[in-house]
Image (cartoon, rainbow, N blue to C red):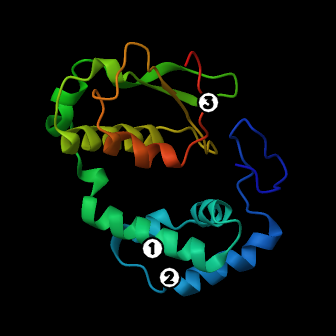
Amino acid sequence: MSLGTKGSSSSGFENTSPPEDYLNKINEVRTLLGPLIGKSSEYCSDAAITRYLAARNGHVKKATKMLKETLKWRTQYKPREIRWEEIAREAETGKIYRSNYTDKYGRPVLLMRPSCQNTKSPKGQIRFLVYCMENAILNLPDNQEQMVWLIDFTVSTCRIYPSKCLEKPLMCYKNITLNA
């Protein structure tokens, strides 16, 4: 993510303060959000709001709408309440896992291997994917804003992963196709 901050680079290590032109916009978003209830404020730090503004090219109303939708989803889906016991069966084959290494910029690497699919329940598969993403985010080093997802589609067919399991998570990532 690059917002023109000093120290921003493709490494994912960002300056912790938002660029000057975003400070007013961050306050506008906070005003439009109104009072936050419960854990919602945990997801509305200056850095988080800056990410939403960047995702919407600095457009305050669009960023606020997107953030409100995220907060609503978090309230309804409760991703932080997913427990290992619920998704352990999904994890048996190692179809998604966090590697024990980082890329050359220090970003954690997560691997997804659709060919190792072992269940047929899209609901369970999505819960496992959300669990893995939340776990990866919780384990990001300080000042790290990015992670790398490697998806190995070798020995894979479209029937292995229902499209619902892939479409939304991949919408927010830079896609790089190797060996296609």
State how far apart marks 3 and 1 are (Cα).
30 Å
Give residue 102's quadrant in the image: top right
Rendered image: mark on residue 176: 3
Q: Earlier in the sequence, mark 3 or mark 2?
A: 2
Compared to residue 16, the image places residue 71 above or below, namely below
Q: Quadrant of the C terminus?
A: top right
Q: Nearer the viewer, mark 1 or mark 2?
A: 1
Rendered image: mark on residue 33: 2
Q: Residue at x 27, y 38 (%)?
A: 128
Q: Amino acid at mark 2?
A: Leu
State how far apart marks 1 and 2 are (Cα).
7 Å
Q: Earlier in the sequence, mark 3 or mark 1?
A: 1
Compared to residue 1, the image places residue 66 above or below, namely below
- Secondary structure beneath dot 1 equals helix
Q: Could you tell me if the residues under marks 1 and 2 are in contact, i.e. CB atoms within 8 Å?
A: yes
Q: Residues within 10 Å of mark 2 (few under 14, many from 20)?
A: some
Q: Could you tell me if the residues under marks 3 and 2 are in contact, i.e. CB atoms within 8 Å?
A: no
- Secondary structure beneath dot 2 equals helix
